[in-house]
Image (tube, rainbow, N blue to C red):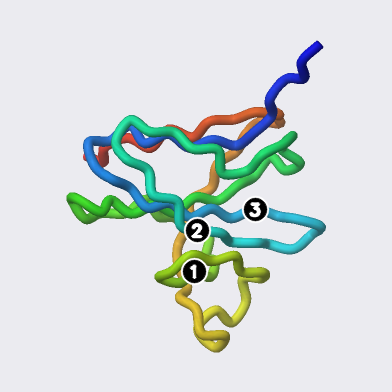
Amino acid sequence: MTTAQADLRVCNRTSSTVGLAIGYQLDGEWISEGWWNLEKDECDTVLMGALVSTKFLVHAIDYDKGGKWVGENFMCTQDKQFTIKGVKECVARGFEKTGFYEVDTAGKQDYTVQLTDQK
C-alpha cells in the first residue's frame, strides 16, 4: 500500500527561468524561504507532506524578462538562499521587505501553483 503524496508544488509555465520564494505559517509563526530556481516547464516541490495551512504566499522573479509576481503580503527575503522566521522589521534585521501574493489551497492536502507568463 502506498500513501498519497501531499505536497505544495510550483510549476514554471513561462518561457523564462524563474526565482521563487514562498511564505507559510508553522506553529503560528510566518516563515519565508527561498530561492528555488525553476527552468521553463520545470516543477519543484517546495513543501513536502500534508499541507497544514490553506494559505501560502508566493513571490517570484522572471530572471530573463524582468518582471515579478508580487502581492500585498509583505515578508522578509534576501538575495542568497534563506529561511527567515517572522515578518516584522525586515529591514531593521538586515533583510529586504518583499511583496508576496496569496495562494489559497481551499483545504486541499496537495496543491500545485502554476506560474504563467505575465501580460
Q: In the figure, is residue 15 to the left or right of 110?
A: left
Q: Mark 1 points at which residue?
A: 77
The answer to which quarter of the image holds residue 11 is top left
Residue 107, placed above or below residue 16: above
User: In this picture, is 92 found above or below 54?
Assistant: below
* Circles 2 and 3: CB atoms closer than 8 Å: no
What x and y, as percent, mark residue 17?
28, 45
Where residue 34 is drawn, which disc sits there?
A: 2
Mark 1 residue crowding within 10 angstroms, few (<14) / some (14–19) / many (20+): many
Few, some or many residues within 10 Å of mark 3 (<14, 14–19, 20+)? many
Residues at circles 1 and 2 in contact by the CB criterion of under 8 Å = yes
Of tags 2 and 3, which is closer to the observer? Answer: 2
Name the amino acid, label 2: Gly
Q: Identify which residue is drawn at 55% across, 38% down.
A: 45
Instruction: Label 2: state its secondary structure.
Output: strand
Given the image, on which type of amino acid does mark 3 rest? Answer: Tyr
At 81% from the left and 57% from the top, the residue drawn is 27
Where is residue 1 shown, x and y percent of the image? 81, 11
Residue matched to label 3 = 24
Mark 3 secondary-structure assignment: strand
